[in-house]
Amino acid sequence: MNYKDAFHRTVHEAPGGCEALAVRMGYTAGLLRNKANPNSTTNVLTMDDASRVMELTGCHDVLHALARQHGFVCTKIDEQPASDMAVLESVTDIWQSLGQVGTQVHTALADGRIDRHEVESIEKAIFVSIRPMMELLARLNGMAQ
């Protein structure tokens, strides 16, 4: 998913929908709807808009879409002190996400060929699996003496 589609989905899936979010942002619903329209050429999405929507909704799909588009992965820095349980949770998250990668690859290879849609699904699963690995690294760095 690209960042414009992620913004559109975030705006329309916000609690109360586009209308409620527009009020919180000081916009009219029509203006926010236009900014969220990936095909709009008049009221365009700005970085300030994206940042504000992420702040208000707690949904960071726009950030992750931008990172993925440019070959990066975003990891939220855990503000809680690292613990053995947090490390174990990170490890099990990694196992689960790697299982998803394996499932996607297995499914794609089942018919003996891979199409573009299957590669995109595998790519998404890989990017999702990188996040818990980075979280594990951050937790371990937090525990290092």
Image: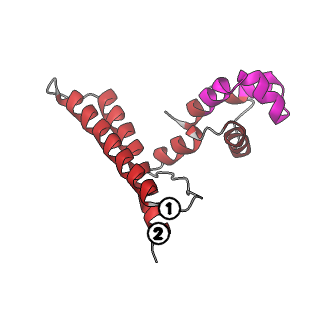
Disc 2: which residue = 143
Alpha carbons under labels 1 and 2: distance apart: 6 Å
Q: Measured from the top left, where is residue 66 in percent x and y?
A: 54, 44
Q: What amino acid is at disc 2?
A: Met
Q: Measured from the top left, where is residue 7 in percent x and y?
A: 62, 33
Which secondary structure lies at badge 1? loop
Residues marked 1 and 2 touching at CB (< 8 Å): yes
Q: In the image, what residue occupies the spot 31% across and 36% down? A: 100
Q: Nearer the viewer, residue 80 or 9?
A: 80
- As displayed, is residue 49 above or below residue 108? below
- As displayed, is residue 90 above or below residue 41? below
Looking at the rendered structure, the number of numbered marks drawn on it comes to 2
Q: Nearer the viewer, residue 7 or 131?
A: 131
- As displayed, is residue 91 above or below residue 27? below
Task: Look at the image and give the residue range highlighted in magenta.
Answer: 7-34
Q: What amino acid is at disc 1?
A: Ala
Q: Is residue 97 magenta?
A: no
Q: In the image, what residue occupies the spot 38% across and 53% down? A: 88
Left or right: where does residue 145 sit relative to residue 99?
right
Q: Residue 50 appears in which quarter of the rendering?
A: top right
Q: Is residue 28 magenta?
A: yes
Instruction: State the residue lying farthest toward the left.
Output: 112
Disc 1: which residue = 82
Left or right: where does residue 32 sit relative to residue 85?
right
**Pointer 1 or 2: first along the chain:** 1
Decide if residue 89 is in sight here.
yes
Q: Looking at the magenta stretch, what is its main secondary structure? A: helix
The mark found on residue 3 in the picture is none
Q: Residue 44 appears in which quarter of the rendering?
A: top right
Q: In the image, what residue occupies the spot 50% across and 67% down? A: 142
Q: Measured from the top left, where is residue 3 in percent x and y?
A: 56, 37
